[in-house]
Image (cartoon, rainbow, N blue to C red):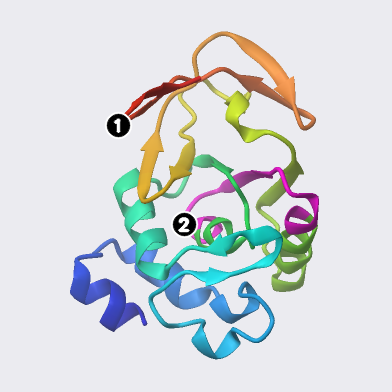
Amino acid sequence: MVDVHLGRRGIHDREVLAAMREVPREVFVGPGYEEFAYEDGPLPIAEGQTISQPYIVAFMLEMSEIGPGDQVLEVGTGSGYAAAVMSRVVDHVYTIERHAPLAEDARRRFQRLGYGNIEVRIGDGTKGCPKQHPSTPSWWRRADRAHRWPCSSSSTSAAGWSFRWATIPTSSGCLR
């Protein structure tokens, strides 16, 4: 998958490619879809959601320019696949999911795989990023775009984390 679907399509970041090789995607797909885990397409998971296709995950990570030393917020944990891949590249991943069953399943997968640098919360991740150093990079995904933004100074809390509001530019305006 990595050589055919990622490398040949322009993904060159060595950290991202290594992470994509390391994380077993079959663990994150829905029951009965394991044989399709390494095809480059989205697959259904619980709660009417999908696991993103591998190329999109790799592309978003590469475009985000995240790496060792970074702490990242992922909004929309889903099965946990993207967070697992990110966790192989950055120091810590905070991931938030609004569907409790998905969050709990992802948490169990991370524990089973020994990915101790991922923290999962249930809640509304559109409220901002974890209160860390103001320049802490955050990763937010919507469709096939990745956004990295610094936190601003206003703060609130959600899902047990302290958050700072962030304005996220999108093609149709901004999310706050």
- Residue drawn at x 47%, y 57% as measured from the top left: 89
- CA neighbours of label 2 inside 10 A, class few (<14), some (14 to 19), many (20+): many
Q: Which picture quadrant has residue 25? A: bottom right
Residue sticking out furthest to the bottom: 35
Residue at image mark 2 = 89
Asked which secondary structure carries label 1, the reply is: loop
Which residues lie in the magenta part?
86-103
Can residue 107 be seen by looking at this rendering? yes
Q: Is residue 104 left or right of residue 136?
A: right
Q: Which picture quadrant has residue 53? A: bottom left
Q: Is residue 75 left or right of residue 16?
A: right
- CA neighbours of label 1 inside 10 A, class few (<14), some (14 to 19), many (20+): few
Tell me whether circle 2 and circle 1 mark residues in contact (CB < 8 Å): no
Q: Position of residue 118 (x, y in %)?
A: 66, 52
Task: Check disc 1 and give the amino acid type.
Answer: Ser
Residue at image mark 1 = 171
Q: Vertically, is 153 above or below 127?
A: above
Task: Check disc 2 and give the amino acid type.
Answer: Val
Q: Vertically, is 95 above or below 125?
A: below
Which is closer to the viewer, label 2 or label 1? 1
- Residue drawn at x 59%, y 47% as measured from the top left: 76
Asked which secondary structure carries label 2, the reply is: loop
Residue 143 included in the magenta stretch of the image: no
- Residue drawn at x 68%, y 33% as measured from the top left: 124
Q: Is residue 162 left or right of residue 86?
A: right
